[in-house]
Amino acid sequence: MRLPLVPSLASAWCATLGALLPATAWARGADDDVTARLAAIRADAAALQPFGLRGALLLEHDGSEQLVQGCGEVFAGGAPIDGDTLFNLGSNAKGYTAAAVLLLCDRGALSLDAPLHELLPGVPADKRAITVRQLLTHSAGLDHSGYFRGDFEEVGRDESVRRILARPLLFAPGKASAYSDAGYHLLAALVELRGEQPFQEFMHEQLLEPLGLERTGFWGPDPQLAELPDSAFASGRVEGEERGSGRQFRAPTWAILGAGGMVGSVRDVAAFQRAVHAGELLSDESATAYESAQFRLGPEQAEGFGFVVVTRGARTIRQSAGGTPQLGHNALVSWSQPDDWLIVVHTADASWRGELLAPRWRALLEGQKVAAPPAVVELPAERLALHAGRFVAESGARFELKAARGRLELAPLDGAGFTTLFASGGASGGAGDGSALRGAAALDGGARRGLDRLLVQRVDPGVEEWRAQQAAALGRETGHEVLGATPLEGGGEPWTFVRFDFERGQALTRFVFGPQGALEAVVLRTELPTLPLWPTPAGDFVPFTLGMSVSLQSLAAPTDAPATPTLRFHDGRRITLKRE
């Protein structure tokens, strides 16, 4: 029986780089303004810290460290974060697995174009021709998730390989590309088998230790990191709640090895990338392959070995991103050539992601201006609490205001509220009739195609098993509502929210679909996104988030009239809410 599809804590959202990058080149090393621009980045990071930014940033040019900035504390009341603090690397671990594969290729133990049936026993006919190169570039046809009961399931190498090989392919190997953790689980198994050493030991002894990377390792009680104090590890935070550090996570099993399960500091990540680039680890041929476009996704974008590669004329940008969103961790690596600027961003709060911070800081590095955080004031908790409650608009859209952490949080309670706040299209319809997709104009082509297959054609086995489980607990499925997709700043695939209706309850689900409609990630039990609203000197509350593009300008909620707050939008609309 196939396992229910669950969120993969290592799944990366590899952003559409063309949307993230400024049209002009980054600042040149000889530019007299570089020092001032780096100072502007440092000031901006400090200005974002009161809004919850917790993380570390590193900028390096031509092999020389230019800026390292820590924001916040490793955990509440703990030591300050710095360039040596360890964060969960998420799917950036794939780049390390790829380097291990290339190292074995240099030694003659593996070949990029060797078929899988020559490397593993019992490979079924439809997967015999899959090559190592296709596993590295997500073009093997493997699904992304649904093989395991989360990243912490206790599963061994052979069982992991068996489950992956038993699942049907999404497409013939080499015909397309769809992001897949499973391919990197198989690559880790090949490293262990062909390297004749347990995977984690191989990674430490053959990659990390020779390069002097003493602050890179694996989740849990990694013996190579045992001498580091707990204060060396950043704790992730979600909605103000501490979720723990990589040291506190359970040791990685074969439900995550190869695709994630690693920790590291921004300095170590930069040192690793620099070592590969300089030929300290791999042969010149393998180092070039590691940094090159391998599987074309479009005119400018391609999959590399653990990275997305974008080419614009003579300029190439190699980037990867990932994290554990449910645990508050996120990491990003981006390297631009030939101007040779490397940026590494680690965050430890679910509200902040490197994919959104990096474009902002790149713009400052370019000498461009970015929108400054709003001026805010502190309000007593009891005053904020006056505005808390559930509200309804004249249209019937429902919302909830919560008071937390010095701000209000505005949350939609239904599809109408969702579309009001996030300017997304959505329509209701019975399961299977396709009407849920009509009118969802804000969904991009990939999400539209993915939803069509998922909701109408019912082709994803993991989601279908979950729907069957929900039906067993809540009765017959009576319909679903596509609430819409959150417009994300900085590009990338939007979060698409679908509410499933059952006879005795509802279940809200969040999907991420790739540009071609492949299901890249799913959170089966989730909540609608909330907007943080900060009190200003003018007496109103304004949204501030780098994660979503919203149409709301402010919320007016006078203390003497907390029962009727007013939503003000950028297009001039005003919506008065009344308490339910």
Image (cartoon, rainbow, N blue to C red):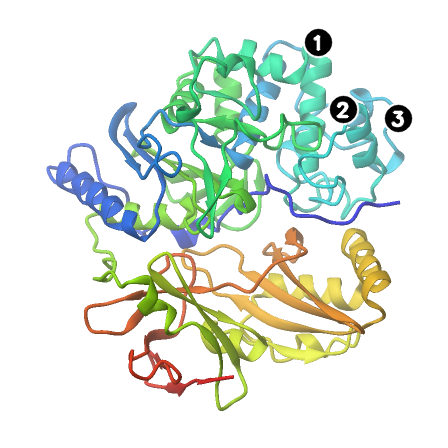
- Disc 3 from disc 2: Cα separation: 14 Å
Which of the pair 25/271 is nearer the observer?
A: 271
Q: Residue furthest left?
A: 32
> Relative to 193, does residue 149 appear above or below in the rendering?
below
- Disc 1 from disc 2: Cα separation: 14 Å
Amino acid under disc 2: Arg
Could you say which disc has been placed on residue 561 in the image?
A: none
The x, y position of residue 532, in whole percent, is 39, 63
- The nearer-to-camera label among 3 and 2 is 2
Please state if 176 lies on the left or on the right of 303 as rendered: right
Instruction: Give the mark, 1 or 3, whose residue is nearer the N terminus.
Output: 3
Q: How many callouts does the rendering have?
A: 3
The x, y position of residue 125, in whole percent, is 88, 35
Q: Would residue 510 be visible to someone looking at this image?
A: yes
Which of the pair 478/196 is nearer the observer?
A: 478
Q: Which residue is mark 2?
A: 157
Q: Which residue is mark 3?
A: 122
Amino acid under disc 1: Glu
- The nearer-to-camera label among 1 and 2 is 2
Please tell me how crowded label 1 is: few (under 14), some (14-19), or many (20+) other residues with Cα within 10 Å: few
Residue in the image at 20% along x and 73% along y: 538
Please state if 192 lies on the left or on the right of 543 as rendered: right
Q: Which quarter of the image is occupied by the N terminus?
A: top right
Instruction: Give the mark, 3 or 2, whose residue is nearer the N terminus.
Output: 3
Which of the pair 417/231 is nearer the observer?
A: 231
Q: Quadrant of residue 9?
A: top right
Q: Residue furthest bottom?
A: 394
Q: Which residue is mark 1?
A: 196
Per the image, label 2 sits on a secondary structure element best described as: helix
Q: Quadrant of residue 78?
A: top left
Badge 1 vs badge 2, beta-carbon distance below 8 Å:
no
